[in-house]
Amino acid sequence: MSLYECVFIARQDISAQQVETLTAELSEIITQGGGTVSKTEYWGLRNIAYRVKKNRKGHYILLNIDAPSAAVKEMERQMSINEDVLRTLTIRVEELEEGPSAMMQSKNSRDERPRRGDGEDRPRREDRGDRPRRDDREPRRMEGGE
């Protein structure tokens, strides 16, 4: 059996529960074909770079699959028929990644970064001097009008 990674984008209109159901249906197709789905990752509702079938966002899902090619082709066929699936990408890999994917690692690293305060980490700019606040200035006058 061959190893595959499959990423698909589901419509933004469906709920996370419906996405889980769709993923379970696709996993069932693989298991009926004699394969296994070793890992399923839900990357969340993310922006798409350009509109796809009138959608600007989509639910991203990654599947790591160990299955014969016939089962993968049947899964791809079912995804192309399903209206909730916007795009798919299935590639054959030499080995499957263990642990979280790069997308999940970057998501976790963003959460662990320290938040910037109100400028406490930056040195004060002394070259500006004391400038008046914008709301303290007199309003501009328009020339030529009333």
Image (cartoon, rainbow, N blue to C red):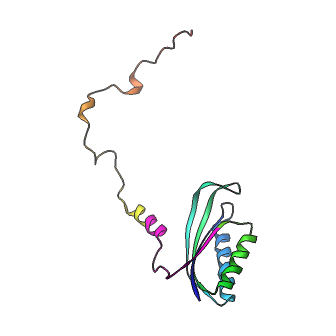
Q: Residue 45 placed where, x, y %?
A: 58, 62
User: Does residue 8 appear to the left or right of 112 in the view shown?
Assistant: right
Looking at the image, residue 119 lies above or below residue 146: below
Is residue 25 visible from the viewing direction of this image?
A: no
Residue drawn 64% across the image and 74% down it: 20
State the residue at coordinates (48%, 14%): 141
Q: Is residue 8 magenta?
A: no
Tell me which residue sits at (69%, 60%) in the image.
Answer: 13
Quadrant in the rendering for residue 25: bottom right
For the residue pair 9 and 128, the one nearer the viewer reads as 9
Asked if residue 40 lies left or right of residue 87, the reply is left
Please tell me whether residue 119 is drawn above or below residue 127 in the rendered image. Answer: below
Rendered position, 92 above or below 32: above
Q: Is residue 112 left or right of residue 92?
A: left
Image quarter hosting the C terminus: top right
Report the number of discs: 0
The answer to whether residue 49 is visible is yes
Quadrant of the image occupied by residue 119:
top left
Q: Answer whether residue 93 is magenta in the image.
A: yes
Which x, y percent locates residue 103?
Answer: 48, 67
For image coordinates 51% across by 11% down, the residue present is 143
Please name whichever residue, 128 or 69, is drawn nearer the observer in this view of the structure: 69
User: Quarter holding the N terminus?
Assistant: bottom right
Q: Which residues are magenta?
A: 88-107
Q: Position of residue 126 (x, y in %)?
A: 23, 34
Q: Quadrant of residue 133?
A: top left
Residue 134 placed where, x, y %?
Answer: 40, 26
